[in-house]
Image (cartoon, grey):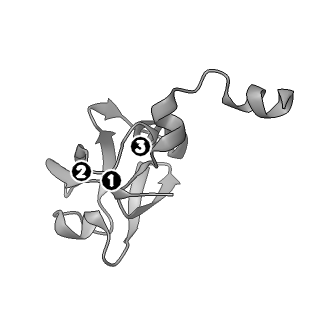
Amino acid sequence: IAKLAAAFVGKQPEDLLHPRGFLGIELNEGTDGLKITAILAAAPATDASLKVGDRLVKVAGKTVTTLKTAKDAVAEVRPGDKVALAVVRDGQTIDVSVTAGEGF
């Protein structure tokens, strides 16, 4: 029982009961930042104007430069949340909104 209790220390009840939000994009970390390498079929991101090759620079107002910073930003997203993303395409920053689906 002590091991189980230790696993939940510091977690809020909503973290234990609610799944994370899901955007439906795959990213690759390179020398020029985070590139969108795929947009999953029937995922929330399919309704946004995102394109493969876009460079993801912000998630929910937080600058993302690595897979870890992107994962940390998305970890706070819950299903149904509207998530503001900023991507760079052809040298232009584009702001898009994605409504998160139910994740894992």
Badge 2 element:
strand
Query: Quarter-wise, where is residue 60 in the image?
Result: top left
Query: Contact (CB < 8 A) between labels 1 and 2?
Result: yes
Q: Residues within 10 Å of mark 2 (few under 14, many from 20)?
A: some
* Amino acid beneath label 1: Arg
Question: In terms of sequence position, does the residue under pointer 1 or pointer 3 come before the other?
Answer: 1
Q: Which residue is mark 3?
A: 74
Badge 1 element:
strand
Left or right, 3 with respect to 14, comes to: right
Percent across and percent down for residue 4 are 78, 34
Percent across and percent down for residue 98 are 22, 54
Percent across and percent down for residue 79 are 33, 50
Q: How many marks?
A: 3
* Amino acid beneath label 3: Val
Q: CA distance from mark 3 to mark 2?
A: 18 Å
| Quadrant occupied by the N terminus | top right
Q: Is residue 65 above or below residue 91?
A: above
Q: Which residue is mark 1?
A: 55
